Amino acid sequence: MVSGVSTTLAPTRLPAPVHRAPRRRTRVLALPEARWALASLLAFLAALPLDLGSAPAWTYGPLYALAYAAGGWEPALEGLRALREKTLDVDLLMIVAALGAASIGQVLDGALLIVIFATSGALEALATARTADSVRGLLDLAPTTATRLDGEREETVPTAELAVGDLILVRPGERIGADGPVVGGTGEVDQATITGESVPVLKRPGDDVFAGTLNGTGALRVRVARDPADSVIARIVTLVEEASRTKAPTQLFIEKIEQRYAVGVVVATLAVFGIPLAFGADLTDALLRAMTFMIVASPCAVVLATMPPLLSAIANAGRHGVLVKSAVAMERLGEIDTTALDKTGTLTEGTPEVTAVRPLTGSGLDEDALLALAAAAEHPSEHPLARAIVAAARARDLPLAPAADFTATPGRGVTAVVEGRTVHVGRAETPEGADTTVRVTRDGTPVGTLALADRLRADAAGATAALTALTGTAPTLLTGDNAPAAARVAAATGITDVRAELLPENKAEAVREWERAGRKVLFVGDGVNDAPALAAAHAGLAMGRAGSDLALETADAVVVRDELTAVPAVVRLSRRARGLVVQNLFIAGTCITVLVLWDLIGHLPLPLGVAGHEGSTVLVGLNGLRLLRESAWRSAPAQEA
């Protein structure tokens, strides 16, 4: 007897090599910021030995001027544009400080400030480019051309010219040019880059394939179902790029106070200069101290503290098939403390499978014979239960006899003549437990029953356990399905709080109750009926492969690969990103405080102030880029906050 919750009747296949997304990395000198910073550095290094060696000023003066111009023209221009819009940019403060140092004879110190400031700007540009590289590299998976079939004629066309309804031929070893169903041929497709599956998947007519996946064996004919610009890979790139243009609440708060802080720095700088001067201090010493104060008090590192970790996390999640739609959403995912899950299509695959074959005593049939008889009668049917029965028979390699006089009656089942006997397959009036029960009769005599159930995802139990560890409480199951079916899935996944037979508004109300109680809820679903709960939750996450358009639009994030383990993984990644934001703010705040007090109480040399300020900015930027690494997705500590 075949039994169990998540029995898979597919044949076992040996692992095959996994094809990863090619790495596309922006060259450092391809960035104009990097080229200008390098020019400034080379000019500074050429002038430095001449200056320190007491050479005539005319030998090193032009080199210093070149260092100032190369490293400072762009931030100066941006600062002036911001000033024209009545906004005080921190870049302008740095340029003013450098020119102020030069005006009192500290040309070397001002040039050093420009060089380090330009270098930190180049590093920030490189961080942004590498974040974009990690996502746009997915586009390299999609082939640039495809073989389009027009009757018996083949033509090679750019994939961008493919239209919905076109028929394309994919030969062994070629990448598939568009999303769509297989309409002819059989082959094993390596789709690890989209679905994360570690072994090639057997594709037959009716199965969906994705652009960019690799056809290993057998020629496939694929009907284009989506415009190439709307393929899974293209959507990943579009959504992540849109997310990169959003700003998280922490970043918005920092930008809100940045202007007031910058004005405060200018006022404080004038006070640091004017008060000692009023009490008889030397003009040069007072101006030098004021310039040093302006440099070390500027909030460059604070401004850079928030977005690099969040954008790096968004890019890393996108590489692993989770589309987080905004920096706001990425920050919210790490704040959740309660999880609610839908059942069908979320914890389960949303497709039925045969879980038990029960021939009746005296029927003269064993399990295989009963299953083959039912599959033969169901073979012409397109009903989901019929497809599940036929798939189960094929998985056992059972021969199917041809069926004649096939008829299907909605709600009553199918009838066909198989090997001269009239076979009827239809739902039993009394289901057995939580399963759907199908009764098989032959010439009007019952010969057995088949039990079918929605297939539980293989990673469902592991995902719920990981979410329990993250939040401290087990997830709640919110489903519109019947109570026995919900209880079966809950028992298999370790969920104890089960709420079944809920309407969409009931799901949303349950989420709102938690929110009113001060909980921050993550809701995971896939259907139209889940959209209200996805909208009501602190963070909503939709399963992408079978998800409805409404659910995908409403959710804050989408799991494209349909891996349930990606849900706790993206929550961990978000928590790590938020942790790095806190680290960055602490680093930036500590450096500013120490350097400002040093300058006010003691004597902080200008070069040391420059190195401390710009060094903290570079450190904060590089710290945020740590989340681009593969290990950040795989090994983020579950409890990191």
Image (cartoon, rainbow, N blue to C red):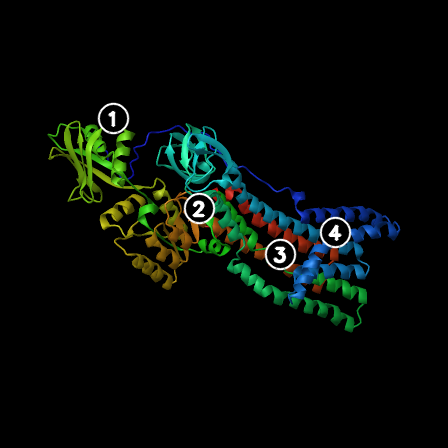
Amino acid type shown at disc 4: Ala
Identify the residue under disc 3. 301
Residue appearing at x 34%, y 43% in the figure: 461
Task: In the rendered structure, find residue 70 and report the number of the disc placed on it.
Answer: 4
Q: CA distance from mark 4 to mark 3?
A: 22 Å
- Assign a secondary structure to mark 3: helix
Looking at the image, is mark 3 or mark 1 nearer the viewer? 1
Sequence-wise first label, 4 or 1: 4
Circles 4 and 3: CB distance less than 8 Å? no
Q: Residues within 10 Å of mark 1 (few under 14, many from 20)?
A: some
Looking at the image, is mark 4 or mark 3 nearer the viewer? 4
Q: Which of 620 and 117 lies nearest the eye of the viewer?
A: 117
Task: In the rendered structure, find residue 530 and report the number of the disc placed on it.
Answer: none
Circles 1 and 2: CB distance less than 8 Å? no
- Assign a secondary structure to mark 4: helix
Q: Residues within 10 Å of mark 3 (few under 14, many from 20)?
A: many
- Assign a secondary structure to mark 1: loop
Sequence-wise first label, 1 or 2: 1
- Assign a secondary structure to mark 2: helix
Sequence-wise first label, 3 or 1: 3
Q: CA distance from mark 3 to mark 2?
A: 29 Å
Amino acid type shown at disc 3: Ala
Looking at the image, can residue 583 be seen? no
Q: Residue 297: give x, y in percent of width and height.
A: 66, 62
Q: Which of 563 and 400 lies nearest the eye of the viewer?
A: 400
Amino acid type shown at disc 1: Pro
Task: In the rendered structure, find residue 399 and report the number of the disc placed on it.
Answer: 1
Residue appearing at x 67%, y 65% in the figure: 83
Looking at the image, is mark 4 or mark 1 nearer the viewer? 1
Identify the residue under disc 2. 569
Looking at the image, is mark 1 or mark 2 nearer the viewer? 1
